[in-house]
Amino acid sequence: MGATAPIFLFLTLQKVHNISMKNYSSHIAIIGAGISGLTLGCVLKQSGMPVIIFEKSSTASEQGAGISISPNGLRVIRNIGIENELRSESGNPKEVQFFYNQNKLTSFPVDIVTTSRQCLYKNLLNKYLSMDGEILFDHEVSNINLIDPSISFSNGSSFNVNHIAACDGIKSKCRSLIYKDAEQPAYSGYSVWRGILEKNQTENHIHLGPNFHIVTYPIDNNRTSFVAAVKNPKETKESWKTKGTYEDLCHDLPESTRHIYESLQDSNEIYKWGVYTKKIPDHLFDNNITFLGDAAHPMVPFLGQGGCMALEDAYIFGKLIKLNADMQKSQKMYQKLRYNRVNKIYKDSALQGKLNHISNPLIVYCRNFLMKYTPVAALKPNSIWGYDPDVEIKKIS
């Protein structure tokens, strides 16, 4: 199938699935057709539950860089039934390698999938639509009623629903409507560069340095994702669509790293954006609404777990809805299973950024020594990756 075929498929399906059923009073209403929204839609459709997705944009698309899906996320992908398709179109690195000043510090084996966000999105969307899942585009939330759950949209439409799943990202309109004093996303102090290198790479490479680190990994057989995170006290715009220049990229990174990304010199697809976060609310739900993914816990990307947390959230909440006739019970179980998990990874991700960017020479020496001569580099990933959502659900069922 040619490169334009998935786009054509998206647009065709978009038109078909913009036809409204009008009555969604028995449906779980998902706000946002991103990773968490589509995953939840797939889980609910597999369970035979009525579901509708409302998406504010007019087209089915995903922005952003590559994404790494570790074993905890892959368990969800496998259970949804898209693992084989995703692996066949993506990178499947078997090792992560760490470097400092071009010298290898350590490595450890992995079984992960590294891909583009567009590829993951395409597979989730096609799976959802293959089960007759419905999406209404051009539906931006304007108001929510939680007493007799209903949603109003800026296009003038409104629907009564059974429950609302807020999957609308870091700038969640749902969250701002429910929590009137909700804080705006806060700049983390990091900016991130991204681009695509036209080369075949078979491992994940992580280059550490003072106040920066660079990650490269394959997203298919011919392309490699380049991501560079830089400490930057000057607030940078939070948008994956913001273009940057090769000259500015070279300015932000030391010359000794230029061999990694020099092929971007002639590229007009270099982007730079600011990393933003929000505090995790004490409760991941309210009356007749539940928050998932970045709508609940946007985190810095330094453990590569933002997407995996969205997958876990959606899978667990979808399974709990099927398990319990009582939605409030499902919400309370979701809170119990997810709050401590995402809160820990939220904090650990911030700590990992600090460890990656150490500049004090003595502390750098100690960190590098531990990484080179002990298994410390693999301990944190393995402790995160062992999470099995089905096992966790059984523990409290």
Image: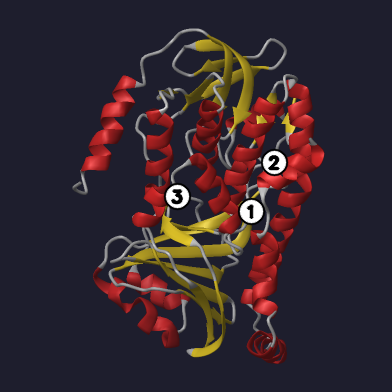
Where, by quadrant of the figure, is residue 110 drawn? bottom right
Q: Identify residue for label 1.
A: 299
Residue 287 in sight = no
Is 34 left, or right, of 62 in this rendering?
right
Using a 10 Å C-alpha cutoff, classify the residue at mark 3 as few (fewer than 14 neighbours), some (14 to 19) or many (20 or more). Answer: some
Q: Is residue 57 left or right of residue 328?
A: left
- Name which residue lies at 70% across and 79% down: 376
**Could you tell me how many numbered marks the image carries?**
3
Mark 1 / mark 2, whichever is N-terminal: 2
First in sequence, mark 2 or 3: give its number.
Answer: 3
Q: Can you give x and y, in whole percent of width and height, for residue 43 in the image?
A: 55, 33
What residue type is disc 2 on?
Glu
The image shows residue 142, relative to residue 196, as above or below, that is above
Amino acid type for the residue under numbered disc 3:
Glu
Q: Please determine whether, in this image, residue 89 is positioned above or below residue 319.
A: below
Q: Residue at x 42, y 64 (%)?
A: 92
**Residue tagged 3:** 83
SS at mark 3? helix
Task: Name the residue beneath numbered marker 2.
Answer: 183
Q: CA distance from mark 1 to mark 2?
A: 15 Å
Q: CA distance from mark 3 to mark 1?
A: 25 Å
Q: Depth check: 284 or 111 in front?
A: 111
Which of the pair 379/283 is nearer the observer? 379
